[in-house]
Amino acid sequence: MKTYQGSEIRNVAVVGHAHSGKTTLIAALLHAAKMTPTQGRVEDGSAVTAYDEEEVARGITMQNAVAFAEWQGTKINFVDTPGFHMFTHEARSALFPVESAVVVVNAQNGVEPVTERVWKFAEEANVPRIVLVNQMDNPKAGGEGGLSALLDDLTERWGRNCVPVQLPIADANGFHGVVDLVTMQAYTYTAGGDGRGKVSAEIPASIVADAKSRHEALVELVAEGKDELMEEFFEKGTIPEEHLIAALHEAIRDDRIFPVLFSSGLANMALDHLLDFIKVYAPAPTERAPIVGQADATRKVDDAEPPTAVVFKTMSDPFAGRISFFKVIGGVVKNDASLENFTRRGSEKLAHLSIMQGRKAVEVSELHAGDLGAVAKLRDTLTGDTLGVKGADFQIALPKLPEPAMTYAIEPKSRADEDKLAPAIHKLMEEDLLIRFFRDPQTNEFLIAGAGQPHIEAIVSRLKKRYHAEVTLKSPKVPYLETIRAKGEAHGRHKKQSGGHGQFGDCKIRMEPQARGAGFEFASEIFGGAIPKNFIPAIEKGIVEAAARGYLAGYPVVDFKVIVYDGSYHDVDSNELSFKTAGRLAFKKAMEVCKPALLEPIMKVEIEAPEEFAGAIMGDLSGRRGRPQGMESKGKVSIVNAEVPMAEMLTYGTQLTSMTQGKGSYRMEMDHYDFVPQPVAEKILANAKRPVEEEEE
C-alpha cells in the first residue's frame, strides 16, 4: 500500500437524505477505481460500507463507515453517513475528519428534509460542499418540472453560488452522460459498465446553447471578486482553462461556489468524472485552516507538526475487538508508535496501524498528516480522545451531540441475560455516543435512551445478535413530577414510648411553591432553642426523603420551599431519627393543604416536511395538546416548531411517517415541566399507585 502525503489525500463525507443512493454511490466509485472486482450492492450486504448486520437487515445506514479509493495518484477517503432523520447526529460527526462534503440529492425527489439538515451542519462546520444529483437513470429524474426546475430549486435554497459545473446528457431513452462546463467536453457512458466514459468534444446539439450559457455563468461567478480574473474575463470574454480550474478549486475551498454534478451510482455512470472532480477541485487536508483545540491552541495539518491524532469513531468488532478510527491532524504516525492519550492521561501503543475499507483493515507502515486511519485494541481510548507525543499536549472537543429523544424500559429475559446486559450495552455505547443506559432510582428499572424507536430497536437487536443478551422492551415511562400550587402550614409530631428511651420529635413547618425549575429550598426560623440546632438537618432529611417518594402518585415532589419555624423536644427521648420522622409527617400533612399537582415534561419539537403536509401536522399537534411556536418555509419544506407534552410524543415517529408518506422528519429535546391539565391528571392518578404509607418508627 502506497504512503500518501497530505497534499495527495482528499477526505470526503457523503451526506444526504435516506435512499438518495449514498452507499450504492460509494460502492460504485470503489468499483470504478478498481478497488473492488465487482460493484457491491446494498440489498445483499456486499456494498463495502454496509457491513453492519442491522443496517443490512433494515436497508438503511445507521452509523458512519469509512472506505478509500486510489485514483490517479490521489487517495480519496470516503465517509458514508446515515440519511435517516433519527441518525443525523452521525452525519454531523462525520464532518469533523473531512475537508469537503458531497451532498447527494435524489434526482426524482429533489432536496428532502435531511438534505437541508446536513447542508446546515456542513455550513456550521465550514465544510465546502459539492452537490451531486444522483440516480439520473431514474425515468422520473428531474422531478415534475424537469432538470431546470430542480436547478432553480437548488439556487433558491442555497443561493446563486450553487451552480452547475456539468450538464446531464439525457433524453427520452434515459441518462447517457455529462458535459463538463469547465472544459466543454462531453463524457458518454454505458449503463452498467465499469464507470469509465468516452470523452468527446462533440456536445449534443440539443444542449449546446444551454451548455454555452451555463459555462459563461460559471466563468463569471468564478471571476467575481478576483480583479485579475475579471480583467481577463472582460478582455478575452472568457478565462483560460488552466486559470479557470485553479480559480474554481480556490472558490470551492473557500465556500464561494457549490458546484452541481450529475451521476448514477447504480448504473455506474459519470463516476470517473466525479473521481476526477474530487481529485482536482476538492481541498486537500493540508489546505484547511489550522485546527483549533482547547484553550485556543492550534495545530496545522502538516507533517512538520508533532504527531497528533483524534479518534472520531469507535467500532466494536467481534473478532478484532474495539477498533478506533482516527484522523492524523499533525506529524506522521508510524506503526507501533507509542502515543499518550491527552484526554485520559494514559499511554497507548498503535500496533497494526491500518486504513479501513469498510470492515476490512488494510495494514500500513505510516500515515501522514491529514489521513484517516484505524487501530485495534487500544486500552482506554474512546471517541473524542486526542493522542500525541508526550509534551506536545493538544486536545480537541468534537461537536456536541443532541440529547436522546426517547427512553424505554428494558427487562432482561433471564438472570444470564441480566449478567451480560451491562457489559454489552457499554460496548455499544462506545460505538454510539447517543445511547444512554441507567437505572431509574424511582422504579429500579433499567432504562435505555436513544434517538427514537427504530434506534432503540436496533440496539436491542444488536444485543441479541452480537452479545447473546436478550431483553424485552417496555413502553417508555413518562417522568412525571409532583409539586404544590398553594402555601400551607403543618405540624409533624412523632412520639413513641416502648420502655427505656423513647422517641420524640416535634416540628411545625410552612410550605410554599417555588418557580419552575427552582428545586427544593429549606430554611429555619427557630429561635430560642425550641428545637436544638443539631436536629434541624434531620427534619430536612426527612422532608427530602418523603418528597422523593412522592405524595399523589409516587413521583418526586419538586419546586417547593419549607421553613421550619417552631417545635419542641425532649431532653432524653429526642434524637435525629425522631426529628427525621417528624419532618416526614409534617411534609405529608402540608401536602394535603398545599394543593398538590402533577407536572409533565414538555418537549421542544421541530418538524420538517413538504409544505403540502403542514396543515395535517398542525391539526395533529393540536390533538396532542401541542402549542405551535411558529412555522417557517425553506423552499418547498415547512418547518414547524412546537411545544408538546412528552406523553403525547411517544408514538409520534410512526404517525408522522404515515401522515407525510415517509417524507417528514422530526427531532425533539426536553425543554421544561408544566402542570398537567386536570382531566389528564385524573386519568394518570387513576392508574398510578399511591406511595405506600410507612409505619411511624
Image: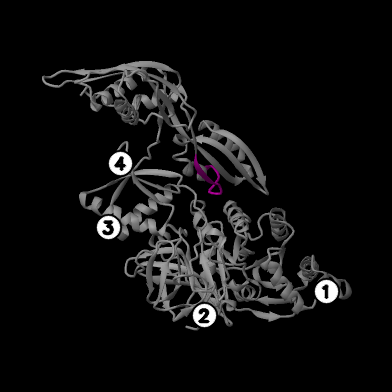
Q: Earlier in the sequence, mark 4 or mark 3?
A: 4
Q: CA distance from mark 2 to mark 3?
A: 38 Å
Q: Tell me, for residue 34, which label it has, or none.
A: 2
Query: Badge 4 local density, few (<14 within 10 Å), some, or many (20+)?
Result: some
Q: In the image, which is nearer the foreground, mark 2 or mark 3? A: 3
Question: Residue 364 placed where, x, y %?
Answer: 44, 80
Which dot, 2 or 4, sits closer to the camera? 4
User: Would residue 411 appear left or right of 82 to someone viewing this image?
Assistant: left
Q: Is residue 576 magenta?
A: no
Q: Which residue is mark 3?
A: 468
Circle 4: residue type: Glu
Which residue is drawn at the image coordinates 31% and 60% (left, top)? 466
Is there a contact, CB below 8 Å, between mark 2 and mark 4? Answer: no
Whether residue 267 is visible here, answered yes or no, is no
Query: Mark 4 = which residue?
Result: 445
Mark 1 vs mark 4, CA separation in Å? 70 Å
- Which amino acid does the dot numbered 3 rest on? His
